[in-house]
Amino acid sequence: MSSELLLRATGIAKVYTGTQHPLATLRHALFGRRLPDVDAYPVLKDINLDVYRGETVGIMGRNGAGKTTLLGILGNVIQPTAGSVERFGRISTLLGLTAGFNANFSGRENAYLFSSIQGLDRAQTDERINGIRSFADLGRYFDMPLRTYSSGMQARLAFACAIHVNSDLIIIDETLAVGDSNFRMRCYERIREMKKKGQTFLLVSHNQNLVANFCTRGVVLEGGAKLFDGPTFEAVEAYKRVRTAAMGDDDLEGRVTKAAKGQPKLPNTAVLEDFHLSERVENGEALVCLSARLVARQKVGAISVNFGVNNSVGIAVCALDGAKAGHPIEGMESGETRRVEMTLQRKTLLPGRYFINAGVNELVGDVMRPLSLYLNFIFFDMIGPETPTGVANLQMALAVGPKEEPADAPVAAQAAS
């Protein structure tokens, strides 16, 4: 990442107005002020955001948090009610599959239309049109009207156009969520390639793993306010806490307060204490071991102790449900304790830092009721060669055979004899 600023949003706010009385809307438009029978709906509140060249910024938030409205303002598609946006360079915006497209135009014509909106002239688009057509992979549909396209085909065209206009900043809102898996993988690979070359992205997604895997920084919105802006791993955890805190709490201030404090409030009638992380060797296998004491603070029913492991960017590597693994605890009396231990094989993990989650759940029929939760409370490091890369060690190996003779060589030799 460089120190070159590409976008600066200051004090962004957006308020929509609405009413069930049409004449009130007309009076509001004519007089330019909000009348008593016109309601105001604040969507964004005092958002400040800087984006620098080389960053990939991921924006997360629950439905209605204001993500799409914010991107529309940043991309100069929506005007803010208050605040300002400074843009330094060309910005390409994908806010919807058909944003900036004409349903009656062909894919080719829409590619020229999209490029012209992004500031390219026809000659510049001529140089890129073959690349757009190749990446979109629409076949004969490239010269057919957009109205005949499926949503996946529209996504192909939109993404292909966006990555070929040579923008300083590309803003994408959930476009990758549409389309077949092969297309999504091609998009992810292209994003990786462009990131290596210094391309700047602003992504909105509900997919935490996508944000964790691609973004250098994370922003969390809640109720139109910016709750967090910082390292990706911490942003993913903040988003998880918001989602957890929202269950059973409709008050925005309460949700934000609980998320900021950390763990959601739980009954803690059965807790884990006295954690101990160690290593040992069993049957020739090196193991990472986490042991803890399970304590019942009051009488509880059937219990499941669960563990999970995340990597340093928040991607879930593996999780273990104690009950499903065949180790449910059939109730505990108040004051009763038990020792529990989780082990994992070191060879299955690639080099990097890993965080452990743990939780105690009461089994009520087919439902698990959380009693206590420990998010990323302890970590350990794996040291080794830099290759392979990824999430888990699948013991991949490569074999290269000797030089082979041409396939027709034996036939020719036999004929000669």
Image: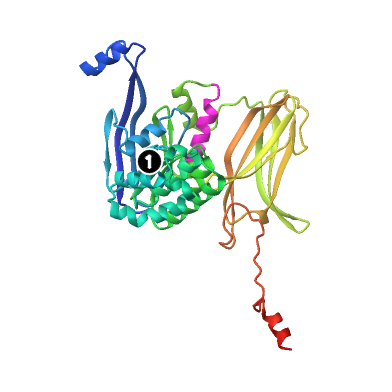
The residue closer to the viewer here, 403 or 74, is 403
Can residue 255 be seen?
yes
Q: Is residue 365 left or right of residue 205?
A: right
Q: Which residue, given by chain and number where applicable, does mark 1 sit on?
A: 105
Residue furthest bottom as drawn: 417
- Image coordinates of residue 16 in percent, x first then y, are 33, 23
User: x%, y% of residue 336?
Assistant: 75, 29
The amino acid type of the residue labelled 1 equals Phe
Please say if 85 is above or below 187. Answer: above
Q: Which of 225/155 is in front?
A: 155
Q: Quadrant of residue 384?
A: bottom right
Magenta span has 241?
yes
Dominant SS type (magenta): helix
Tell me the magenta residue range.
Answer: 235-248
Front one among 166 and 113: 113
Q: Relative to 43, say whether 3 is above or below.
A: below
Residue at (44, 47) in percent of width and height: 142
Quarter location, residue 123 = bottom left
- Which residue is located at x 33 percent, y 38 percent? 74
Q: Residue at x 56, y 46 (%)?
A: 181
Rendered location of residue 303, percent (x, y): 72, 30
Where disc 1 sits, the SS reads loop
Image location (x, y in percent) of residue 10: 29, 36
Decide: is 82 above or below 375: above
Q: Nearer the viewer, residue 380 or 200?
A: 200
Q: Left or right of 15: which side holds 348? A: right
Please identify the quadrant where the C terminus is shown: bottom right
